[in-house]
Image (tube, rainbow, N blue to C red):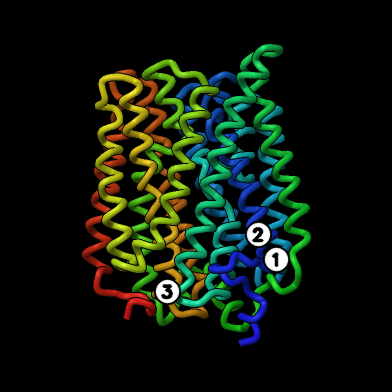
Amino acid sequence: MAIKSRIPNPESHLLTRDARVLFATRFIRLFAYGSLSVILVFYLVAIGLSEQQAGLLLTLTLAGDVVVSLLLTTRADRMGRRRMLVIGAVLMIAAAVVFASTRTLWVLTIAGIVGVISPSGHEVGPFLSIEQAALSHVVTDKTRTTVFAWYTLAGSTATALGALAGGAATRALQTTMSAVDSYRAVVLLYAALGLALAVLFARLSPSAEAATLGEKKALRATVAGLAGIDKSRDVVVKLSALFALDSFGGGFVIQSFAAYWFYLRYGITPAALGVIFFWANILAGLSALAASRLARRFGLIRTMVATHLPSNVLLILVPLMPNLPSAIAVLLARFSISQMDVPTRQSYTMAVVSPDERAAAAGITGVARTIGAAISPLFVGYFFARPKLINLPFFIAGVLKIAYDLLLYRAFVSVRPPEEK
């Protein structure tokens, strides 16, 4: 097919110009998310918000990301993917500028809802759904998981470097300015990186746009929920429900709150937290490469569950550790396998839905994950405001995510992607 002639061969690591741009934008975006996630709760508390108000703000921020994602991804076919990606980058800039400029809760809330802010260090907004659908169309079934593995590694490495940079920047800046101003500088860095994204997205060629009628219909379908999903309806409904459960559990331990928990429990500074989460995300990214090899041998669903389930047991153990070194060791062990389900999950979703419904499936399941994650921070803020309850988010997250693993295996172990038949 003509479209595959201009696509990179993931085995040879040769990328087209558009592919290089998209890998660059993912790296910059996740670097921005990682740098902000380490200091965000610290910043909000430093400017006068309580832990409960910060939790509410982050919940509304993630809820707003759902709306932004729907509005932009479902208009990408008519108005252009490149244009929607640029708009998403502009919303990153706008949110960061407002966050850096005011202490007023209602203004911050509006900026968080309308703009694109990532408190988790992971993808939010419209970017991932558009990129996922594009990648799945340009690789073969046998190489799809490997491509998503490298894509995940690029993001995890960027998040790791961002966390390290965010923590190091605050430490360096606090020698000449107040803590709150050092945190504000990282927020402004987030805005600057959003500007770099806008410039790079504007350089995408027309070949990055929705190419076929089926693809365009699939993108439009997302705005109407499942109205446009036909052959893949049952699969998308089940996956969306399960992914929402997983993200709801994960929302209790998003990187911003995990970092703040280490501060509350052990008094760790943002600079030290940046180092911890640098290595955590590096391990997570490297594990993605191993996931593609395991998936070829054992299958996507078995790899997802067999790696994700023990990582959630380790998550429960983090607050039970008697001292800081052991808590860090368990956290790093958890990260070393926790993200192995990411490229396999993305690959599996793209494999078991109809090719002309992939964009809609990515959008719908992505929105389901964001909705699930948006609810949890409200509870975490309440727990963190009460010293006796600060460990509870880890226990809730672990139990919910283990339930997700078991339900996923039961529902989909017999639904095999094409390369496993």
Indicate left or right for 296 with 82 as reference.
Answer: left
Dot 3 falls on a residue whose secondary structure is helix
Q: Residue at x 45, y 28 (%)?
A: 259
Q: Residues within 10 Å of mark 1 (few under 14, many from 20)?
A: some
Q: Amino acid at mark 1?
A: Asp
Identify the residue position indicated by label 2 in the image: 22
Residue 339 placed where, x, y %?
A: 40, 50
Q: Please tell me which residue lies in front, 165 or 412.
A: 165
Residue 170, relative to residue 10: is it above or below?
above
Residue 12, relative to residue 260: is it above or below?
below
Q: Residues within 10 Å of mark 2 (few under 14, many from 20)?
A: many
Front disc: 1 or 3: 1
Q: Residues within 10 Å of mark 3 (few under 14, many from 20)?
A: some
Q: Amino acid at mark 3?
A: Ala
Labels 1 and 2 touching (C-beta < 8 A): yes
Residue 52 placed where, x, y %?
A: 44, 27
Q: Residue at x 29, y 74 (%)?
A: 415
Identify the residue position indicated by label 1 in the image: 18
Residue 90, relative to residue 233: is it above or below?
above
Residue 246 placed where, x, y %?
A: 34, 51
Which circle marks residue 351 in the picture? Answer: 3
Q: Amino acid at mark 2?
A: Leu
Q: Please tell me how many numbered marks the rendered image carries.
A: 3
